[in-house]
Amino acid sequence: MEYERIKKTMDRQKRIALVAHDNKKMDLVEWCKKHEDTLKQHFLMGTGTTSRLIAEATGLPVRAFKSGPLGGDQQIGARIAEGLIDMLIFFWDPLEAQPHDPDVKALLRIAAVYDIPIANNRATADFIMASKHMNQEYTHEVCDYNKLLSERVAKVAEEK
């Protein structure tokens, strides 16, 4: 199936979601300290404790949502779907079972659906920070899911 595409432009100042599992929180805090000069040029948000730890360690303003298991992952996912988050830095722990794993999977899925950059480890996050697109506007094409859904609804209505 061929999807129609629409152009989407990210502003020079990116809206970055910062998320980390418990065993990776301090890794993300250290990564944020390393990239503080770049991050201070953008709008930061994240899940509960992670946001607080980053803000305390760096002095950067980080908008906090609920903790992941209490719905923070879903809050961030909803904002991705609304076009209010441009990228996701998510240091996840692949060796630890998470009680809210379905929420994590849903967050990663929605980030992929809306074609935003996703880093789930330090190396990928470093590559994103070093990208020429990090501090300038970036236009890319994304699938026009609204049009696709409208066509599906019309087809179902037609079949009735």
Image: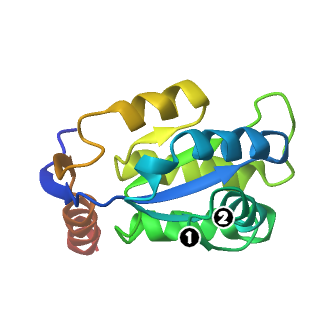
Position of residue 24 in the picture relative to residue 124 (left or right): right
- Of 36 and 43, nearer the camera is 36
Query: Residue 18: where, in percent of width, then height?
Result: 59, 54
- Of 118 and 132, nearer the camera is 132
Is the residue marked by circle 1 packed among few (<14), some (14-19), or many (20+) residues within 10 Å? some
Mark 2 lies on residue: 55
- Of 123 and 76, nearer the camera is 123
Position of residue 148 in the picture relative to residue 87 (left or right): left
Pick the quarter of the image with the N terminus.
Answer: top left
| Residue at 78% over, 64% down | 49
Pick the quarter of the image with the C terminus.
Answer: bottom left
Q: Earlier in the sequence, mark 1 or mark 2?
A: 2
| Residue at 76% over, 48% down | 101
Query: Residue 65: where, in percent of width, then height?
Result: 65, 74
Number of labelled discs?
A: 2
Is the residue marked by circle 2 packed among few (<14), some (14-19), or many (20+) residues within 10 Å? many
Q: Secondary structure at mark 1?
A: loop
Query: Residue 68, located in which quarter of the rendered image?
Result: bottom right
Inspect the image, locate mark 2, and give the three-letter code of the amino acid beneath it.
Ala
Position of residue 8 in the picture relative to residue 14 (left or right): left
Query: Residue 34, located in which quarter of the rendered image?
Result: top right
The numbered mark at residue 61 is 1
